[in-house]
Image: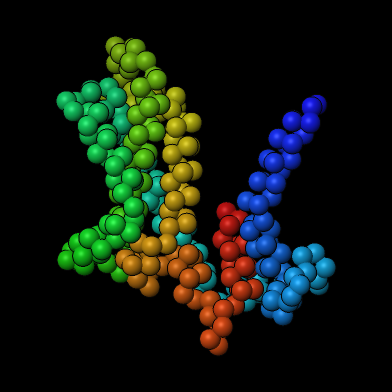
């Protein structure tokens, strides 16, 4: 192996360590006492581990409520969005209505717009309809936000499935629903998994809209990380690290 390859690998390792450093800090800080965590010079590995921060997280009643809400909103919205996106993607792929490409571009442009640019209009619309501060309104928003990306991914996979499968199943007496869910759907499972993973990551980590639109019944862990970490006027870094570690595990 030449020196250039060694240098290339070294640079890659340095970049990887730089990106991994915050994750390592969160993991170590979750098991440090507050005094050890703020000590200078920092003790990276030489410290006595403690579970006080994790106990503090688990002892807060709102943690379990917010964690349950996070799971329900994430899994529920992604599941509903995938069902709707699959049906729409099948229609676009097989029937090819006029203006399909333009419609697909409009749908994808929803995800291109910065969240901060639309949070005020969305808030005003939700307030006018009475959907703000409600669990159903939050679920509806995440479903709406997950559909465009899921539709794009699933349409690409469906375009790769030959229409002859549909024709053969229809000739043999299968209904259109049978063709969609028993013939075509199994062949696009990788697309469903990919769309589910990307959307779950988005909803699981989303903060801005949940903070603005979600009420007490629809608040998720990222909001708790931002607004529920002060103790006596100071920032509870140990609590933040422990909560971040627990929330990162899923």
Q: Is residue 173 visible?
A: no
Question: Is residue 5 or residue 45 the one in the foreground?
Answer: 5
The colouring scheme, among rainbow, by chain, secondary structure or one colour, is rainbow
Q: What quarter of the picture does the C terminus occupy? A: bottom right
Residue beneath the point at 46% across and 49% down? 200
Question: Is residue 19 or residue 69 the one in the foreground?
Answer: 19
Residue 42 falls left or right of residue 146: right
Q: Quadrant of residue 59?
A: bottom right
Residue 213 falls left or right of residue 60: left
Residue beneath the point at 38% across and 73% down? 216
Relative to 95, is 250 above or below?
Answer: below
Question: Is residue 99 or residue 247 the one in the foreground?
Answer: 99
Q: What quarter of the picture does the N terminus occupy? A: top right
Question: Total label count?
Answer: 0
Q: Position of residue 88 (x, y in %)?
A: 28, 34
Residue beneath the point at 80% across and 64% down? 45
Q: Position of residue 76 (x, y in %)?
A: 40, 52
Give the residue furthest to the bottom.
232
Q: Position of residue 71 (x, y in %)?
A: 47, 57
Relative to 203, is 236 above or below?
Answer: below
Residue beneath the point at 40% across and 47% down? 78
Q: Is residue 157 visible?
A: yes
Give the residue furthest to the front.
3
Q: Quadrant of residue 118?
A: bottom left
Residue 62 falls left or right of residue 209: right
Q: Position of residue 74 (x, y in %)?
A: 43, 54
Question: Is residue 69 or residue 102 the one in the foreground?
Answer: 102
């Amino acid at each position: 192996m030449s020196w250039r390859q060694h240098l290339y690998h070294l640079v890659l390792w340095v970049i990887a360590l730089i990106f991994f450093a915050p994750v390592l800090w969160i993991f170590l800080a979750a098991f440090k006492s507050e005094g050890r965590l703020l000590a200078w010079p920092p003790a990276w590995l030489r410290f006595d581990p403690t579970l006080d921060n994790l106990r503090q997280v688990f002892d807060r009643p709102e943690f379990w409520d917010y964690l349950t809400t996070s799971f329900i909103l994430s899994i529920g919205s992604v599941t509903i969005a995938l069902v709707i996106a699959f049906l729409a993607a099948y229609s676009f792929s097989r029937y090819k209505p006029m203006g399909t490409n333009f419609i697909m571009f409009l749908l994808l442009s929803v995800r291109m717009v910065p969240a901060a640019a639309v949070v005020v209009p969305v808030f005003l619309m939700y307030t006018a309809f009475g959907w703000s501060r409600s669990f159903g309104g939050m679920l509806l928003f995440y479903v709406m936000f997950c559909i465009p990306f899921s539709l794009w991914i699933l349409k690409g996979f469906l375009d790769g499935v030959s229409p002859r499968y549909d024709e053969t199943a229809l000739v043999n007496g299968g209904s259109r629903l049978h063709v969609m869910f028993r013939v075509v759907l199994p062949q696009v499972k990788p697309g469903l998994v990919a769309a589910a993973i990307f959307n779950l990551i988005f909803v699981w980590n989303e903060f801005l809209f949940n903070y603005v639109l979600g009420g007490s019944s629809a608040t998720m862990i990222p909001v708790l990380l931002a607004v529920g970490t002060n103790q006596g006027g100071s920032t509870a870094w140990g609590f933040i690290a422990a909560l971040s570690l627990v929330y990162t595990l899923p």
